Structures are given as C-alpha cells and as structure tokens.
Amino acid sequence: MKFTSIAFLALALCLPLWGADKDKPLTPREVMQLFIGTWDSEMTIIPEGDPTKAKTSQMIRTRKWSRKKTFVVEQANPDEGIWVLTYDPKKKNYRSVFITPEITDNIYGDWDDSKKIMTWHGREDNGNILKGHHRVIDKDHHEWELSLFNGDKLLVKLTGKHKRRLKTKQ
C-alpha cells in the first residue's frame, strides 16, 4: 500500500510535465511575451564609455501587446520615446524601432534561447551604429547594454536593469 501511494504521488507530480519539452526553444511570441509588463527601470548613460561621466536615472516602463499581439509597444515615464518590438518570420529575426522627436533607431535582434539573450544591432537615422544585448535573468529581472558608435568611435554606452513591478490590488 505504501508503494502504491508513492507511485500515485510520483505520477501526480509528473503529469503536468508530460508533453512539456523543456529543451524546446521558445516561439517568437513566447520570446516577445518575456518583455510584456510594467517595469521599474534603471538606466546608466556613460558618455564615451567614461565611467566618471556616468549618470543614472530611473523610470517606469510599460510594455503591452498590440491588439493582435503582433507588436510589443513600450511607453516609458518620464521618457519621451516609444519602443516597438515585433518578429519578422521571413527574415527570422526580431525588428525593433525606438522613436523620439529627434531620432529614430532601427534595430534587429537575434534570440539565443540557451542563454536567454537577445543580441541587437542597428542604425540610427543619422548613420550611427548600435550594438548591444538584452538578457533575461528570470521572468521578473532583465538587464541590458547598448553601445552607440560613429564609425569606430564610441559615442555613448547605455546599461540598464529592469525589475517587474508587482501588481497592486485595486
């Protein structure tokens, strides 16, 4: 009787795992879902990569699905920029744009599922080159880094951390 109870317990614990393939890569929509939520965000701006000139600011980033769940759209407060993320099934990469009144960044990303890292590359509309990455530490914590170059010259390095805000009861 004792072994039967243990067998049923083991079966009950394993049933939810049947059919779940932990080694199966995330789908593009599942990757984009990692970005959804409201985040307390810290960003450090490091002009020319010089840590003595670094300035850190905090903001709240709200990232939501578009109506048909094709885009992730971010509005940050107090930031004046808008960020949009989508997946291009033909090119098999992620496309992103960051828009402010002064500049537009066109950014392309490749997802490494084993490392939970999106590697970014792109250009501003003024020709500057962007390179960076976004790492998902866990569902509630992300970190990222982005460098902006004019040719080989580093103009600015940006680093940041996001922590998911807890939902408050209304």
Image (cartoon, rainbow, N blue to C red):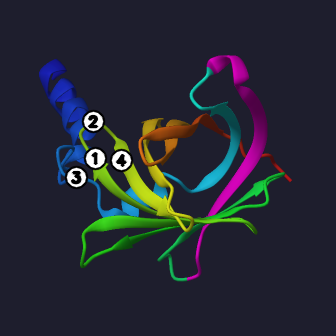
Residue 145 visible in the snapshot? no
Q: What range is drawn magenta here?
A: 51-67
* The stretch drawn in magenta includes residue 31: no
The image shows residue 155 at horizontal and vertical percentages of: 57, 40
Depth order, front residue of 15/95: 95
The image shows residue 161 at horizontal and vertical percentages of: 60, 34
Q: Nearer the viewer, mark 4 or mark 3?
A: 4
The amino acid type, in three-letter code, at marker 4 is Thr
Rendered image quadrant of residue 76: bottom right
Rendered image quadrant of residue 110: bottom left
Q: Classify residue 89 as left or right of residue 55.
A: left
The image shows residue 8 at horizontal and vertical percentages of: 20, 35
The residue pinned by badge 3 equals: 25
Residue 13 circle label: 2
The image shows residue 130 at horizontal and vertical percentages of: 46, 51
Q: Give the distance between the C-alpha atoms of the residues marked 4 and 3, in whole angstroms.
A: 16 Å
The amino acid type, in three-letter code, at marker 1 is Pro
Residue 82 position (above or below residue 79)? below
